[in-house]
Amino acid sequence: MKRGWRYFKVFGISLLVFILVFPLGLMMTFPTSAVQTWINTLNLPGKVSVTRVHLDPIMRLRLNDLVWQPEKNPLVEVIVLKGVKARPSWSKIFLGKKVLEFTGEMGASKIFGHVEFQKKGRVVLSLATEDRVFFPTPFVLRRGVDLQGAWQLKGDVLMDKEGETGKMSGGWAFSIKNFHLKWPSSPLGRIDLSFISGRVDGNITRSVFNVDKIVFRGNMMDVDGTALFWHDPIKGDIRIKGTLYFRPKIGLKTSNAPLDGAIRMLPKDPRGFRLVF
């Protein structure tokens, strides 16, 4: 009995030492600078950067101030996530899967999801907002631009390093409630526009983003249409084409006369005034 108790104490002490020493050793040897450099050199349209990468004692990877500066966006200067935390999904790791769960701060809400590293360089990313996120979070808007309302996002993306020309596939859904845009210095002059609801759904095939549903409903105007956009590897910019149909209402001419005039100059068909771009 005493010998069994002695073995139990040795095992308990060894386990305790492992629990204390392993995270400390991992924290000291974890390549935080290499991870930070990798993030800061991602091949994305626009500049991505993070101010700090570190691993805490309970094996959570923390990214401070993850910033994406999109190219040539007239409304948004940068997109900022104040704090991103990632940790291993132990329940799935014990089943033989390589999965990281993550959360990011979105004002009073959060964005959460997981990343699964599969065989042959395949990576699956799933994400969603925890609840409604209120504008302008997470956007830093250009001077004079004001956005109000709430939005939600859900999406799944597969990235295949060993695929053919197309490296990404998946789908997403983005919805907006009580959207209000104020843009005093737009190319069409002052814009003060609101929508009761909006939804943008799409899928990704061979790295081409297919927006197969664009629907916005408001008191001043309704909008619907479709679009495609992709990253041009030769020129290094985003290419977009699509069709939007505008159906202005009586209040638009009073509140946004330049915009109303520009819309009514477009070709008209049964679905509304048609803009092809």
Image (spheres, grey):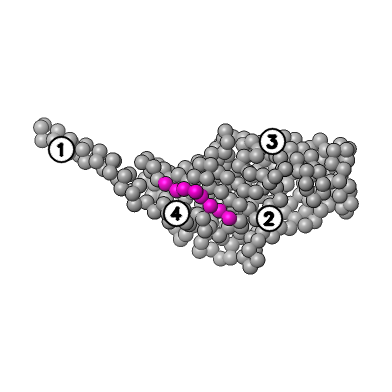
Counting residues from the N terminus, which is met first, the one under dot 1 or under dot 4? 1
Look at the numbered discs 4 and 2 and tell me whether their residues touch, using CB distance below 8 Å: no
Cα gap from disc 3 to disc 2, whole angstroms: 24 Å
Residue shown at 85% from the left, 48% from the top: 263
Q: Earlier in the sequence, mark 3 or mark 1?
A: 1
Give the labeled residue for mark 1.
Answer: 7
- Give the residue number, with chain letter if any, for mark 2: 72
Is any part of residue 261 visible from this angle? Answer: yes
SS label for mark 2: loop
Q: Quadrant of residue 89?
A: top left
Question: Who comes first in sequence, dot 4 or dot 2?
Answer: 4
Q: Point out the residue furthest to the front here.
A: 143
Magenta residues, start to end: 47-54
**Are the two marked residues, 2 and 1, in contact with CB atoms closer than 8 angstroms?**
no
Measure the alpha-carbon separation of dots 1 and 4. Answer: 41 Å
Residue 266 lies in magenta, yes or no?
A: no
Q: Quadrant of residue 145?
A: top right
| Sooner in the amino-acid sequence: mark 2 or mark 1 | 1
Foreground: 206 or 250? 250
Does the stretch in magenta take in 51? yes
Label whose residue precedes the other's in the sequence (3 or 4): 4
Frontmost of labels 3 and 4 is 4
Q: Residue 219, relative to residue 72: is it above or below?
A: above
Report the amino acid beneath label 3. Answer: Gly
The amino acid pointed to by label 1 is: Tyr
Tell me: residue 182, above or below residue 262.
above
Which residue carries the number 4 mark?
35
Q: Disc 3 marks which residue?
A: 149
